[in-house]
Image (cartoon, rainbow, N blue to C red):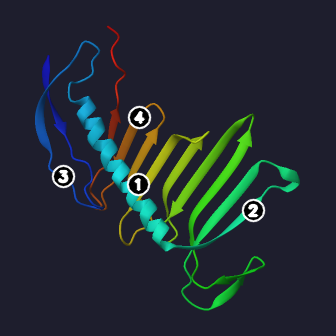
């Protein structure tokens, strides 16, 4: 059974769209199209390149960090990394902090019932959340990436990757008349022979 499906491109850069193309597909007995693994691989690679760009940009902005732990030896730890100093220092929560220092990264680690839960949030230079990662025992379980338009505080693109190799990309162009588009990708399990 062949059908024509409109494949739309993945965002290349922050606001450019790839050209859409029509490709014939053949469906297998399980209903999975033959090019689904290729589509998933392309979307996953694009997401991971963006994630690495966010991490390296945050790494270049980090200047110092603060760490805190829960009281009475609880298994809760929080580390906040701040941007490099831009001017005269000021007094911030009991500690002298350079002026213009915004949060770049926040990491919260909790231990519950023998499981270590780790949440990492990255922020851009304007203080907007750009990347949110969740780990269980050092294994990535959820990753969310938000892309923003230059002068807006609303994300125009949202990527969501969850355990089990499921990937969603929601694109909301900045034009007023444009509609939101959502694309789903997944890696199919190998078939049992």
User: Label for residue 166?
Assistant: 4
Query: Circle 2 is placed at which residue position?
Result: 68
Element carrying mark 3:
loop
Element carrying mark 1:
helix
| Cα gap from disc 4 to disc 2, whole angstroms | 34 Å
- In the image, taking residue 151 as reference, residue 111 lies left or right, namely right
Split into 4 quadrants, where in the image is the C terminus? Answer: top left
Split into 4 quadrants, where in the image is the N terminus? Answer: top left
Chain-order first, disc 4 or disc 2: 2
Query: Circle 3 is placed at which residue position?
Result: 18
Chain-order first, disc 3 or disc 4: 3
> Which residue: 27% across, 55% down?
178
Instruction: Work out whether residue 13 can be spotted.
Output: yes
Query: Circle 1 is placed at which residue position?
Result: 51
List x then y, in percent, for residue 108.
66, 54
List x then y, in percent, for residue 74.
82, 49
Q: Residues within 10 Å of mark 2 (few under 14, many from 20)?
A: few
Question: Closer to the observer: label 1 or label 3?
Answer: 1
User: Is 39 located above or below residue 20 in the figure?
Assistant: above
């Amino acid at each position: 059974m062949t059908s024509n499906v409109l494949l739309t491109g993945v965002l290349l850069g922050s606001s450019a769209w790839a050209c859409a193309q029509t490709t014939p597909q053949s469906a297998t007995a399980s209903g999975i199209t033959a090019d689904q693994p290729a589509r998933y691989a392309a979307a996953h690679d694009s997401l991971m390149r963006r994630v690495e760009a966010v991490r390296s940009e945050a790494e270049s902005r980090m200047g110092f960090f603060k760490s805190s732990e829960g009281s009475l030896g609880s298994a809760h730890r929080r580390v906040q990394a701040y941007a490099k100093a831009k001017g005269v220092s000021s007094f911030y929560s009991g500690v002298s902090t350079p002026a213009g220092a915004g949060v770049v990264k926040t990491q919260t680690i909790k231990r519950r019932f023998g499981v270590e839960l780790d949440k990492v949030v990255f922020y851009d230079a304007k203080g907007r959340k750009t990347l949110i990662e969740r780990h269980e025992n050092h294994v990535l379980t959820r990753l969310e990436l938000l892309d923003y338009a230059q002068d807006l505080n609303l994300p125009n693109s949202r990527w969501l990757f969850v355990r089990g190799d499921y990937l969603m990309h929601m694109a909301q162009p900045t034009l007023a008349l444009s509609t939101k588009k959502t694309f789903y990708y997944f890696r199919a399990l190998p078939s049992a022979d």
